[in-house]
Image: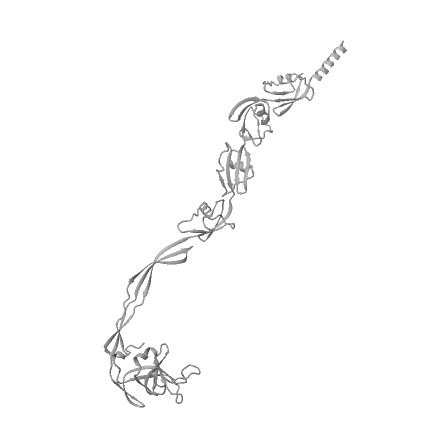
Amino acid sequence: LISAVLLVVIGLALIGLELQKNVTLVVNGQARTISTWGLTVGNLLAKETIRLSTADRLQPVASAWLNEGSVIQLTRASMVSILADGKQRSMRTPLQRAGNILAMAGIRLYPEDQVLVDGEPLSAEQKLPFSGLHTVSVRRAVRVRLETPTGVKTFYSAAPTLGKALWEAGISLQEGDHLAPAAETPLDGPVQASYTPAREITILVDGKQIRTRSAAKNVGEALAEAGLALQGLDYSQPAAHSPLPASGKIDVVRVQEKLEIAQEPMAYEIEYQPDPSLEIDNQRIIESGAFGVMAQQVRLRLENGVEVSRTIEGEWLAREPQNRVIGYGTQITKKVANTAEGKIEYWRAIQMYATSYSPCRLGVPNYCHDITASGLKLQKGVAGVAKSWYGYVVGQRVYVPGYGVAVIADFGNGIPGKYLIDLGFSDHDYQPWHQNVTVYFLWPPPPPEQIMWVLP
């Protein structure tokens, strides 16, 4: 009897050992090992107080038998709110991929469409994080037609803004790039845009170099973008209407115009008046005279501070000159001088430079001529003076110490700055003269109208 009871106990123990097993329960991706006496998946879930909803996914099914090492997968259904094509719908599903969820809701995805899960971009093939509530949105891709300097590029994008769409298309906007409409423009429908990438430019202005970037159509727009719009008479090189230069260099020339009043002195003239109180060849100043003033309005043009032109815009006489008046002596008296040839009477004595000449010493090579301007024969006793004197003194008799008496009957070119007398000789009695002498004009004087009162 004891043996029979022992066998029963042992048998029951063996049956109990056979009924107890270790299984793995995975709930929403979290796994744990459970030792259980349950016979089915449903027994295990009931023992673990896990209740199922109709939308939950269980593998294997609740009626499936448990074995040692069984793996039970439970995916709780999530409440998903779907926003697509302007409509909102909700569903409870255990599906974990957004693409599958959208397909289950009858929403078709197209290339370049964008899926957002709880506000964050997520690939349609990626699994949603385990959560009781999700929002899945579909941003439809729109057509973007982009005009560029190298041609037209067309693509589709579901980016929220035009700038983001360009970035996704490999176009990174930089400072100075031109994009119209603006990068912040929402992509809520097809967009036609133009894009011009900026270029590096260097602006030379006010003695400084300013480096910037610009996509402007011409130089004037580039300067305006840089806050350097041309003002007044300013100009640029190249000109404002010119396209941006290949070198990228733009010179800004600052132009100023000033009005100045310039004054130029005007020389006065000299007037001579006879003065009977003075001896001949003496002078005195009656009126000293004063310079006049000619005024001019001058327009000065300066480029980058350097004067480049002056233009006279008006001229007027600010002050008339006042002539200098000089009185010259007209008093003639007879004078006497003792010379080596005896006493002479004269009315005028002038310091002159004496030279000599003869028929074959006229200063012309291989040329001889013995007739003077007056018709007298050239010989000793004939003298010549500068042509400017000749008309006044022709025929007058003079005395030259060391030479003697001569009559003025010839003229020459003279020497500037000197009172010149040329003493005549014949070729056989020629004597060279090159010295200063006192020339005495012998008494009597000629009529007043034939007297050179003021020596030139």
Residue 105 sits in quarter: top right
**Who is closer to the viewer here, 243 or 171?**
243
Q: Where residue 403 sits: x, y (%)?
A: 34, 87
Asked which colour scheme the image uses, the reply is one colour
Q: Where residue 404 sits: x, y (%)?
A: 33, 88
Q: Is residue 205 visible?
A: no
- Left or right of 447 in this view: 425: right
Q: Residue at x 32, y 65 (%)?
A: 265
17 w.r.t. 430: above or below: above
Q: Please, which residue is most extreme toward the front here? A: 375
**Who is closer to the viewer here, 397 or 77?**
397
83 w.r.t. 329: above or below: above
- Left or right of 36 in this view: 183: left
Quarter of the image that includes the N terminus: top right
Q: Where residue 172 sits: x, y (%)?
A: 54, 40
**Who is closer to the viewer here, 279 or 14?**
279
Q: Where residue 201 sits: x, y (%)?
A: 50, 48
- Left or right of 88 in this view: 452: left
Residue 59 sits in quarter: top right
79 w.r.t. 306: above or below: above
454 w.r.t. 252: above or below: below
Q: Residue at x 31, y 79 (%)?
A: 391
- Number of disc labels: 0
Q: Is residue 88 visible?
A: yes
**Who is closer to the viewer here, 429 or 8?**
429
Q: Please, which residue is most extreme toward the top here? A: 1
Quarter of the image that includes the C terminus: bottom left
